[in-house]
Amino acid sequence: MAKRFYELHVAGCTRQLPVLNISDTLAIAGFVILGDTDIVVNCSRELAEKIPKDTDVIMTAETKGIPLAAEMARILHMKRYVVARKSVKAYMENPIWVEDESITTAGKQRLYLQDADIELMKGKNVLLVDDVISTGGSMKAMKQLAEKAGAHVIGEAAILAEGDAAKRKDIIYLAPLPLFDAEK
């Protein structure tokens, strides 16, 4: 059970986020949008207003970005969005992949795209979407994967920019999220 909390205010919502150690020196505020319809709907609406108007396809990675991408696609009247999967599924023929390293996932993992998604993205303007941008590792991997599929990445968007990511001018986000010193 967390002993510390960070009060987040974003898109008209207030949440008490548990502050959790992820190393001996670093702690993060745990932001989980899965199951939180108010956060997903309100943030999707605000992000959809800020993205490039020439966005053809929204792409996210499993798992926490999925409800955000789905709701943004619905708001923008897109019939489909793309999810980079973390493993190859039986229905995926000739998938392409890249390696990904994220602050919240131990070790390296791979992101995969299936044939249908590759065809949907080829030659299109793709917006990368996630719940939080921190070190940028997941976005870098998604960008490599989208470009490998023949897409033109025209932006990166998230609900929150964590730590130094909030200083970046090349991303779209709704609110900053600080990093914390770990507690013993």
Image (spheres, helix red, strand yellow):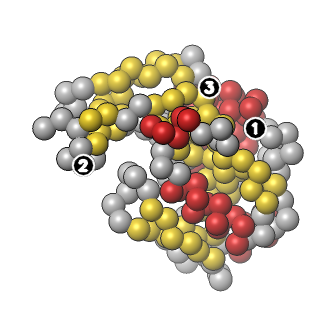
The mark closer to the camera, 1 or 3, is: 1
The reply, left or right, for residue 5 in relation to residue 127 is left
Q: Looking at the image, which residue is at 86% across and 45% down? A: 54
Which element type, helix, strand or loop, lies under badge 3? helix
Marks 2 and 3, how far apart in space?
32 Å
In-front residue for pair 158/118: 158
Identify the residue position indicated by label 3 in the image. Answer: 42
C-alpha distance separating marks 1 and 2: 34 Å
* Residue 133 or residue 58, whichever sits in front: 133
Q: Amino acid at mark 3?
A: Asn
Kind of residue indicated by mark 1:
Ile
- Looking at the rendering, which quadrant does residue 32 occupy? top left
Asked where in the image residue 8 lies, by quadrant, the reply is top left
Residue at 85% over, 65% down? 123
Name the kind of residue labelled 2 in the image: Ser
User: Which residue does the numbered mark 2 point to in the structure image?
Assistant: 23
Q: Position of residue 87 (x, y in %)?
A: 49, 70
Query: Left or right: where does residue 1 sit relative to residue 118?
Result: left
| Label 2: which secondary element | loop
Q: In the image, what residue occupies the spot 22% across and 31% down?
A: 2
Query: Circle 1 sits on which residue?
Result: 51
> Is 153 placed above or below 14 here?
below
Where is residue 126 drawn, in percent x and y? 76, 54
Query: Of marks 1 and 3, which one's residue comes earlier in the chain?
Result: 3
Residue 184 screen position, x and y as percent: 13, 38
* Quarter of the figure that contains the N terminus: top left
